Image (tube, grey):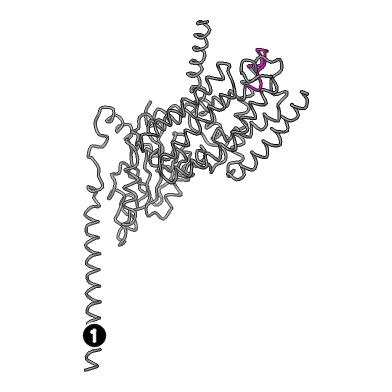
Amino acid sequence: MASIVLKLAMAVISILLLGPLVGGLLSGTDRFLSARMQRRQGPPVLQPFYDISKFFQKKAYIVNGLQHFLVVGHLLFLMLSIGIIYAGQDILLSVFSLTLAEMMLCLAAFSASAPYSNMSAQREMLQMACAEPILLLLCIGLYLSSGSFLVKDIIRCDLPAIVKTPGIFFAFLIALPIELRKSPFDVSTSHHAHQEMVKGVTTDISGSVLGIVELSEWYELFLMVTLTGLFFICSNPVSLVYAILAALIVLFGLTLCDNVFPRVRWERMLAFTWGTTLVAGGGNMLILMLLDK
Amino acid sequence: MKISKSPWVLHYDGSSCNGCDIEVLASTTPRYDLERFGIINTGDPKHADVFLITGGVNFQNRMVVQQLYSQMPDPKVVVAVGICACDGGVFKECYNIMGGVDKVIPVDVYVPGCAARPESIIDGVVKALAILDHKRDRMKQGLPPEEKEWSPKNGEGAEAMQQQEERIQAQIQASDAARAAMRKEQEEELHGGHE
């Protein structure tokens, strides 16, 4: 019994250490690919690691005592989200932990009592209201296709979840640019609108605290890649290769979409995500529930 | 890892005609591509390392420039782009222009030109990165990053501001005196007429 717990703990800890490496490399690759798509040379692939090392070398201007605590809380709950999935536990709990992490980032921005921070936090909450329902739908879709909320049961099914939940996967693809902070560009933390709302929720965050926010973005990227891969994993070990391949293709497609549709505004995001959630996601769920009868 | 591998730039326009600003933005286009050095043009001074300033400083925006500079966390460097930011350029003798940016904040690299070419701007930024590394090394040794501690009061512009204040006061007094004299004349005419 103790050895199982120990093995589990080792697995989770190694994933938590692997997460930022993968997240950072993917983030750097995304910038590099974006640049090449725009016929520029672009930064080196390791650029995010240089960025984060710079943040920890700068002097931080602390706005208030609460912000640092909230940002660290944001990071910890994101790590919890990833840990829950890789420990094979309840995926719904993982999504709730993710929501709490996002909320803590918004609170950190609100606590600065500066106008740009506050406006950006409001827009960030709007963004959450659009993307979170799709994540909940993802959990329900995985439950309907495998009969359980636990990740260890989901990955042991005979068929990968994508076979029964293509509509929900499509809705999740729509939520991915929002979760990965690529679109829309006028909502706070978009990576590509460098001066929207000054700098979004991170306007009054600097130095080592900003480094923690950057690190948590890598974890978030790793989490999204994991969720994408979950749709493709089944009891066949070869499906792992397919899952990783699918995740990479999805990331490449996201970079491409981001370069093709750079100026999506928040009103459009609202209409589009809710429309897709109801039609594709809700429709898929309805069909699955009817077929199961 | 060296801090010069990821220098984020804050671009501010003092009293520029926007020529140098357009050249700075042109440096981010695919032809010259600043991002290959890891440079991001951020709008937030709290995230920036390099303060890229164009145009001269006038009496209205001197406090803004100083505030932006003080909001940047250490280590930081200032690059004055264009001849107007270096010493005032063609607008040097104007009544409202204090002069170059070094009247209000310490400048590390001067990039002359009207407008400065993107190649010169990139050259200037690369030179500034070496200075940034040097300042970071000083910080690691526990020394303050600047040799001379900077504060808004000890800029060269302090005496220029003082002279401007005196000039304005003199003008106000002169116009008050003139108005008083005119009113006295009118009074005398009025009373003189009655009597």
Q: Residue at x 43, y 31 (%)?
A: A71
In the foreground, A129 or B105: A129
Residue B8 percent across, percent down from the top left: 41, 37
Subunit ID for the residue under disc 1: B
User: Residue A208: where, in percent of width, then height?
Assistant: 38, 30
Q: Is residue B40 left or right of residue B155?
A: right
Q: In this view, does A154 lie to the left or right of A106?
A: right
Residues packed near mark 1 inside 10 Å, few (<14), some (14 to 19) or many (20 plus): few
Tell which residue pokes out farthest to the bottom in this image.
B195
Which of A195/B121 is in front?
A195
Position of the C terminus of chain A by quadrant: top right
Is B37 left or right of B142, judged from the image as shown?
A: right
Q: Considering the numbered disc 1 on the image, is that residue within a helix, a strand or a loop?
A: helix
Where is residue B81 drawn, in percent x and y?
37, 47
* Image: A108 above or below B102: above
Question: What secondary structure predominates along the stretch shown in magenta?
Answer: loop
* Residue type marked 1: Glu
Question: The magenta stretch spans which residues?
Answer: A230-240
The one nearer the camera, A20 or A114, is A114
Instruction: Give the answer, above or below, for where A16 lies relative to A48.
Output: above
Residue in the foreground of this view, choosing between A215 and B156: A215
In the image, residue A260 above or below residue A215: below
Q: Which residue is drawn at 23% across and 89% down?
A: B191
Q: How many labels does the image show?
A: 1
Is A68 located above or below residue A11 in the figure? Answer: below
x then y, percent, for residue B53: 37, 47
What residue is shown with label 1? B187
| Residue at the image position 64 percent from the left and 38 percent from the top | A273
Horizontal arrangement in the rendering, residue B184 relative to residue A237 (left or right): left
Per the image, is B57 magenta? no
